[in-house]
Image: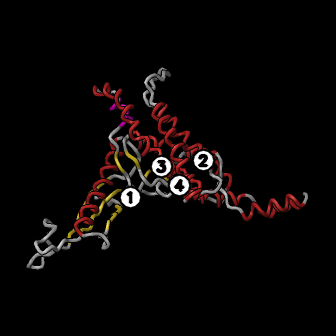
């Protein structure tokens, strides 16, 4: 049989919590993460596949054997439980690593000696500008990074349409399964990247929550007999606009704090998010009747309010 790589995510007991509360929280959070992953998988959102869940107890009976069924004793001896989630291993690199690699590769392609020679032929202001650029760390903004940002917006929109809020959206929690191979040949690298498109996967659903609203995104589900009931779902989606707006705000702040001068990438993420919802429900003949554009509009209106609250915290603490 073929071996499969597996990631085991274990939640250890927290000694600062009451044992009974710790057992309850550990189990519920592990199950909640598994439910969110399964819900995303059913909606064809790229995320790791759940393979198994296991709980281990350290409570021993009179014979010294571990009793996995009981969690408390009459004497109040509450067992500590470790919950493990077995999920599919995802190959590749994180989006954060990819952006950093793009910065390094761009820096090596532009020879510092030739650039310095060109600048030294000019005035002193060009030399000063060159030195400032050397000391400043920025983010590469080109067609490839913009495409990755746009696809991130599409992927997050698809997850939100499935009724799942991630809770910890950062560029470290989004992976690229097919990162472009590093090469020293600039010509070959440019040729490979022209046809390259990032295959993104969301990971780390430890803080994820599920909302009551779900939008059918797959073609099979949309053409089913129950698709007529979807007219009520846009209204239900409004109730979860706050949670989804906070999710987008967390991602926006992660971009700006981790990747300097990445405002164009944030705009591309929001563009991909908006266009995903605008494309839902559109027919093949180009008609946009029945689309979910108003859902994205409600979420973006709420996002503005979340931003204002964030600015007030930064000003007044």
As measured in the structure, the alpha-carbon distance from the residue carrying label 1 to the one carrying label 3 is 14 Å
The Cα atoms of the two marked residues, 4 and 2, are separated by 12 Å
Secondary structure type for disc 2 = helix
Lower sequence index among marks 3 and 4: 4
In this orientation, does residue 25 appear?
yes
Measure how far apart labels 2 and 3 are at the Cα level.
16 Å
Asked if residue 257 is positioned above or below residue 270 in the image, the reply reads: below
Residues at discs 4 and 1 in contact (Cβ within 8 Å): no
**In what quadrant of the picture does the N terminus appear?**
bottom left
Q: Secondary structure at mark 3?
A: strand
* Residue 95 image label: 4
Give yes or no for contact between labels 3 and 4 (Cβ–Cβ under 8 Å). Answer: yes
Dividing the picture into quarters, in which one does residue 31 lie?
bottom left
Q: Which residues are magenta?
A: 214-222
Dot 1: what SS? Answer: loop
Kindly identify which residue carries mark 3: 200
Among the 4 quarters of the image, the one containing residue 271: top right
Please indicate whether residue 227 sits to the left or right of residue 271 in the image.
left
Badge nearest the viewer, 4 or 2:
2
Nearer to me, 4 or 110: 110
What residue did someone put label 1 on?
89
Closer to the camera in the image, 34 or 207: 207
The mark closer to the camera, 2 or 1, is 2
Q: Which of pointers 4 and 2 lies earlier in the amino acid sequence?
A: 4
**Pointer 2 residue:** 265
| Mark 4 crowdedness (10 Å alpha carbons): few <14, some 14-19, many ≥20 | many
- Sequence order check: which comes first, mark 2 or mark 1? 1
**Mark 2 or mark 3: whose residue is earlier in sequence:** 3
Tags 1 and 3 in contact by the CB under 8 Å rule? no
List x then y, in percent, for residue 17.
Answer: 30, 69
């Amino acid at each position: 049989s073929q071996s499969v790589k597996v990631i085991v995510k274990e939640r250890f007991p927290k000694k600062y919590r009451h044992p009974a509360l710790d057992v309850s929280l550990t189990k519920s959070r592990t199950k909640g993460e598994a439910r969110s992953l399964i819900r995303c998988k059913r909606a064809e959102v790229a995320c790791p596949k759940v393979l198994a869940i296991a709980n281990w107890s350290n409570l021993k009976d009179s014979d010294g054997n571990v009793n996995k069924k009981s969690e408390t004793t009459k004497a109040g001896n509450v067992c500590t439980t470790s919950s493990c989630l077995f999920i599919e291993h995802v190959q590749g690199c994180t989006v954060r690593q990819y952006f950093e690699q793009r910065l390094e590769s761009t820096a090596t392609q532009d020879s510092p000696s030739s650039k310095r020679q060109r600048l030294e032929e000019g005035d002193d202001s060009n030399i000063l500008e060159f030195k400032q650029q050397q000391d400043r760390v920025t983010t590469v903004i080109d067609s490839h990074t913009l495409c990755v940002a746009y696809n991130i917006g599409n992927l997050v929109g698809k997850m939100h349409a499935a009724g799942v809020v991630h809770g910890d959206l950062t560029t470290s929690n989004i992976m690229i399964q097919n990162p472009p191979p590093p090469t020293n040949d600039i010509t070959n690298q440019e040729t490979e990247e022209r046809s390259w498109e990032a295959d993104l996967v969301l990971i780390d659903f430890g803080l994820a929550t599920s909302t009551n609203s779900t939008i059918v995104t797959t073609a099979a589900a949309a053409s089913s007999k129950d698709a007529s009931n979807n007219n009520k779902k846009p209204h239900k989606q409004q109730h979860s606009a706050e949670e989804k707006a906070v999710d987008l705000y967390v991602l926006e702040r992660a971009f700006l704090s981790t990747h300097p001068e990445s405002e164009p990438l944030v705009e591309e993420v929001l563009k991909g998010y908006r266009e995903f919802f605008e494309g839902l429900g559109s027919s093949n003949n180009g008609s946009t009747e029945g689309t979910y554009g108003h859902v994205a509009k409600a979420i973006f209106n709420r996002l503005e309010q979340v931003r204002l609250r964030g600015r007030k915290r930064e000003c007044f603490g």
